[in-house]
Image (cartoon, rainbow, N blue to C red):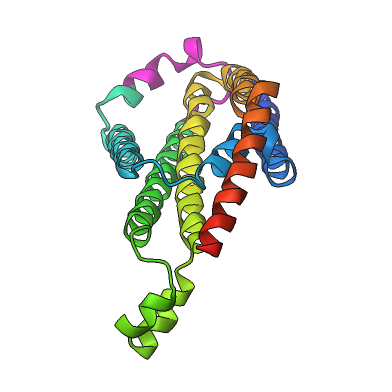
Amino acid sequence: MKKEALDLALVPMGLIILASYHVWLVRRVRREPTRTVMGINSINRRFWFQSLRNNIMASTLMASTAIMLSSVIAILMTNSGGWPSRLQEGRAKLVVGDASELGLTIKFVSILSCFLLAFLFEVQSVRYYSHSSILINVPIYGSGAKAACGGQELRLRRKITPEFVAKMLDKGNIFWSLGLRAIYFSFPLFLWIFGPVPMFTCCVVLVSLLYFLDMSSDEETKTGSTASEAADQAALAAAKF
């Protein structure tokens, strides 16, 4: 009962730490984008001097990896003579916490859920990146488009503005980040197999590492501000043109 109490105490605490950090990160990105790496990248994506092919390939690779790992976890769960059975024999020595068959099943299902979520997010990322790569080549609505387009097509082309395409690209990046975070979440859940103490320790270490990866330095903040001003000037020049 005492070992099960460790799972009931440390596992929710670790998940709350991870969830609280990401809630704080979302608020920081929305309010002070130039102080976060995600916000600076979002500003820099206003420039169209890059190919989307690398982003699509990266999202496809992550989706393939996530679904492959999901298949491995599913095989481990259904294979009665596989690794989970051998782990079950020595669980009293290795696992500090709940080592029952039900607890082990819950742990594997949690890891599987993370990989499936990562796969779904990465597929959506590929979807938005693909749409952006097509819409970015649509000519901007202007006086020359009136003669070449019919009424309905003209109304549709008016909606395809640079801001609309930028939103599509940002959505693709958001889904890419969500898929990556889902894979990050699987690390402490994997260590949960060996007990709640490694899982809680991994949550604390992971939040510390993510903080240094997500926050930007003063030089990056200045670069993001300069990029934002340049993007605004480019947008004004395009509007005048």
Return the residue nearer the eye: 121 or 166.
Answer: 166
> Looking at the image, is 86 positioned above or below residue 23?
above
Q: Is residue 81 magenta?
A: no
Q: Position of residue 210 (x, y in %)?
A: 60, 25
> Looking at the image, is 177 positioned above or below residue 234?
above
Q: Position of residue 63 (x, y in %)?
A: 33, 42
Residue at figure coordinates x 33%, y 19% from the top left = 86
Residue at figure coordinates x 51%, y 36% from the top left = 181
Return the residue nearer the eye: 229 or 53.
Answer: 229
Return the residue nearer the eye: 204 or 234.
Answer: 234
Residue at figure coordinates x 43%, y 72% from the top left = 141
Residue 149 visible in the snapshot: no
| Number of numbered callouts drawn | 0
Residue 192 visible in the snapshot: yes
Residue lying farthest to the front in this orientation: 241
Q: Taken as a whole, is the magenta stretch helix, strand or loop?
A: helix
Residue lying farthest to the top in this orientation: 93
Is 59 positioned to the left or the right of 7 in the image? left
> Looking at the image, is 197 positioned above or below residue 139?
above
Q: Quadrant of residue 151?
A: bottom left
Q: Is residue 89 magenta?
A: yes
Q: Which residues are magenta?
A: 86-103
Residue at figure coordinates x 70%, y 47% from the top left = 30
Is 64 positioned to the left or the right of 89 in the image? left
Is 74 positioned to the left or the right of 35 in the image? left
Is 90 positioned to the left or the right of 25 in the image? left
Q: Position of residue 22 (x, y in %)?
A: 65, 38
Quadrant (top left/top right/bottom left/bottom right) for the N terminus: top right
Return the residue nearer the eye: 125 or 142.
Answer: 142
